[in-house]
Amino acid sequence: MSQSQDFSNERPRELVVRGPRAESPSRVQIVEALDFDVGDDSEGESLLEYWQILRRRKGAFLLVSFLGMLAGVLATIPATPIYQAQTSLEVMAPNENFLNLNLKDVNPISPVEFYFESFLQTQVKILQSDALRDRVLAKLSVASRPELFRETSRLATWRKALGIPDKPVPADDDNKAPPALTNLQVRIAPNTRLVQVVCDSPNPRFAAEYASALVNEYIEQGLEFRSTGTERTREWLARQLNDLKIKLEKSEEQLQAYGRNSGLLYTAEKENVVEEKLKQLQDELSKAQAERISKQSQYEIASSSPAESLPEVLDNGPLREYQVRLAELRRQLAELSFSLTPAHYKVRRVEAQIAEIEATLRKERNNIVTRIRNEFEAARRREKLLATAYARQAQLVSEQAGKAIQYNILKREVDTSRQLYDSLLQRVKEAGIISAMQASNIRVIDPARTPKRPYKPNLFVNAGLGLLAGVFCGVVFVFLREHADRSFKGPGDAAMYLKVPELGVIPSNTSAGAKSPHGRRRLVISLRNAPKPEPKTDGNGPESKNGNTERVELATWQQQPSALAESFRATLTSILLSGNNGARPRIIVFTSPNPMEGKTTVVCNLGIALAEINRRVLLIDADMRQPRLHSIFDLPNTWGLSDLLREKTPPQSSPLEALVRETHISNLYLLPSGPATLSISNLLYSPRLSELLARFHEEFDAVMIDTPPMMQIADARVLGRLADAVILVVSAGRTSRDVARAANKRLREDGIPVLGTILNRWEPASVGRYGYGYSYYQSYHTERR
């Protein structure tokens, strides 16, 4: 590892004694450097993150999915097998012009498609009616077939196998539907004239029989209704036809007599000659007026506008040619004027041509205007003549109007009677033909067949549906559990929820390769080939007792080429670069919200990493209730911090060897907690603690203090007031975000600067977007070795 920066260029010779209100200059600079704002750059969980959530809780997900599939299977086993018989009918529209008395003409607003759709829906209701069902059951004689009333479920089969008697057969009742008829469906095939009749029954033979009998009875019922209605209609039409015949003869006699007496003259088409001529004159007068208006408009435009703007002038071919020629001559004249004098023969020749063409254009335009005026005068004279003729003819028509009104009344009565007579005569003929026919508008397309296999319950379909429901419930259950888990999951969570920098992420000791055989092999190779520093010859240190002892607290020293060791070195780099303008934390308190979150492991490895770059580091075990640092470094705990706080000798006058112990790692020193005492709080509030820290500030580049969990014990808060900064250690999957937020808030309320957080025991495989780097790092060290 490359050499990192120094904590400071020069060590201060004196340290101001810190109290609750006293702040050192370096500490003030560190506090200012800790202004930290985390923007909400979260874009939501990606699909890969969802997949990782399912992987973390795959056991619960698979269990719920399996239970869903098992529920589908268990619901299928006791179910009764149901057979389905189906038949298809083509329903054609009836003879609406006859039987329904031209209903479509009576209601022309309703389109044909809408009427036929209503007709189909009516037929569906008829097929589902109770009256038709009773006819079918009576025809099949279901009351005399007791097998149709027996229970046919698998439970009934099991009861029969156990010798339990069946339920009694009900009394004969032709109108009672047997249990064998479980369901009847009638549906219309989309965009067709086909009606599908589906019958469900546990008896396959009865399903086909009932479907076929239902269709046959439906057709027979329709024929009966059709025959009865046709006969009644024919009889009624015959009576009406006789009455209309008498009325028509009487109306024709009255019309002929009135025409002879009034002297009205009509053509073969039964139209009045005088009125016909008036209509012709009216049409011609309208055309003449329209033509006169058009000519008048053209003439007024020609009189008030320049001739060049008239459409006749613009559309005249010779005039356009003259205009084009005139423009060309004018262009030539303009070109000659630049080089020749006006008296030159070429110029005079072009001017003569221009004058000739302009005269021709004026003559043609005058001729067009004259022609428009003549056409307007002719149209006006013709309109006057037609208006005079129309007035004379209208006078003649008005003289005969009174007589024509009565004549037309009689004529309309005759026409109406004749139309009704002809229509009824045609219907009577049709009724005679149809009454002799037995045609049906229903045709069987696909007759019902006895099904060979039940269509439900389907074991595979139900199992699949149960599995889908289980998968859905499993996903919901997993994500509800994940949402209920309030612990930190991965990198970035602490910065997001606590609004403080995340100084480092420490992976779990088993995460860098213990998930697969290849990962285990790479981890063993890296640990086996990793060079270890030589232990001291004084017999101290964990290596002197067991040459193969490895502890996670010493991973940075024992497993130098590993992802775990490098994560501590990366965290140390973040701490070194955390200040501004050379302000570096010298005395740092390490704490955690709850016990067993790995703060001691973090302190040991960060101290070792800092000692590796030739910095003098002191580790202080301030957890006097459960001290561990002395056992990690295999040092005695006969005296320590508790003894130094009780002594009266000033720390400045004591040699360093009397204050700290040297470990087996170069540049790394330890101050154990010392013997247990009941007055820990009194010791921490004594003035000697600030004096000790002032002496250690002079002697060491860094002082790292391991303290108890701060949510239960106040030691970390007391020491934090005397230190440069506090670092919170949180454990992935263990530390609650709410507890960590409360701990951070408590430190800030005390005025203690929080340098940042360290995420410990993180499983890289639990979050896909970060896991690749650690597997890559392990491969890198394996290749190097």
Image (cartoon, rainbow, N blue to C red):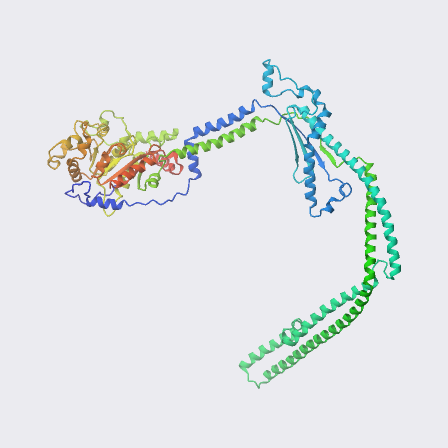
Quarter of the image holding residue 82? top right
Quarter of the image holding residue 458? top right
Image-based side of 144 in relation to 426, left or right: left
Q: 46 or 769: which is nearer to us?
A: 46
Residue 781, how many percent across, how many down? 33, 35
Residue 198, how many percent across, how many down? 66, 30
Seen from this angle, which residue lies furthest top?
Answer: 163
Residue 556, how many percent across, how many down? 27, 34
- Residue in view at x 69 percent, y 72 percent: 296
In the picture, the quarter occupied by the N terminus is: top left
Q: 727 or 384: which is nearer to us?
A: 384
Q: 597 or 683: which is nearer to us?
A: 683
- Residue in view at x 30 percent, y 45 percent: 36
Image-based side of 495 in relation to 166, left or right: left
Residue 239, how many percent across, how many down? 84, 42
Quarter of the image holding residue 243? top right
Image-based side of 344 in relation to 539, left or right: right
Q: 546 or 299: which is nearer to us?
A: 299
Image-based side of 233 in relation to 609, left or right: right
